[in-house]
Amino acid sequence: MTYYSKQEIDRLREDAIRRTQEMYSRSRSREIPPSENFSEEFSPPPLQYIPPPVSQNPPPHMPPPENPPPFMPQNPSPFANILSGKKLDKDSLILLGLLYLLYKENADKKLLLAILYIFF
């Protein structure tokens, strides 16, 4: 770590103050005088609300579809029958998630069966 003497710190501080004053004076010189302010000349017109056209004929009423799309697929998976009668609470979902992760990691079959036993 670099250590500075008191004189070096004072010199760095004075240099920082000088650079700050330079930047401030440069920013003041670039300001647009009020007489050259163009924002009043080229301001956009105010927005006006234009209501949509009112049609004389209302849109035709469409009847609801006769056969709504089913929520479940037509060919449910074998697990759908197992899970349909079980109330899934927080603990059951955690066990199912653990079971799925262990299955994807090729865990021991006895471990998977033990988790299934706890689940049911």
Image (cartoon, helix red, strand yellow):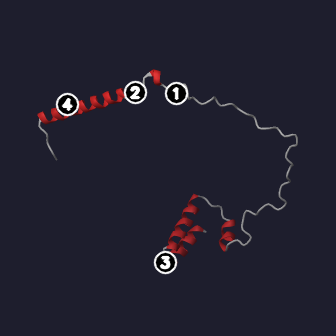
Residue 17 vs residue 113, the one in the foreground? 17
Label drawn at residue 108:
3
Question: Does residue 73 lie above or below 51 as drawn?
Answer: below
Which amino acid type is shown beneath numbered disc 4?
Answer: Glu
How far, Cα to Cα, is label 1 from label 3?
A: 75 Å
Q: Which mark is residue 10?
A: none
- Mark 4–mark 2 CB contact (< 8 Å): no
Q: Is residue 25 left or right of residue 85?
A: left
The three-letter code of the residue at mark 2 reads Glu
> What percent of the width, then of the height, locates residue 39?
52, 27
Q: Which residue is mark 4?
A: 14
- Neighbour tally class for label 3: few under 14, some 14-19, many 20 plus, Cα within 10 Å: few
Q: What amino acid is at disc 3?
A: Asp
**How far separated are the C-alphas under marks 1 and 4?**
39 Å
Asked if residue 78 is positioned above or below residue 18 in the image, the reply reads: below
Residue identifier under label 2: 31
Tag 1, which secondary structure? Answer: loop
Mark 3 and mark 4: Cα distance apart in space: 72 Å
Mark 1 sits on what residue? 39
Q: Earlier in the sequence, mark 1 or mark 3?
A: 1
Q: Mark 2 or 3 closer to N-term?
A: 2
Distance between the Cα atoms at labels 4 and 2? 26 Å
Occupied quadrant, residue 13: top left
Instruction: Identify the image quadrant of residue 65.
Output: bottom right
Residue at position x 48%, y 74% from top?
105
| Residue 29: percent from left, percent from top | 35, 27
Marks 1,4: beta carbons within 8 A: no
Identity of the residue furthest to the bottom in this view: 109
Give me the residue at 85% from left, 46% from top.
59
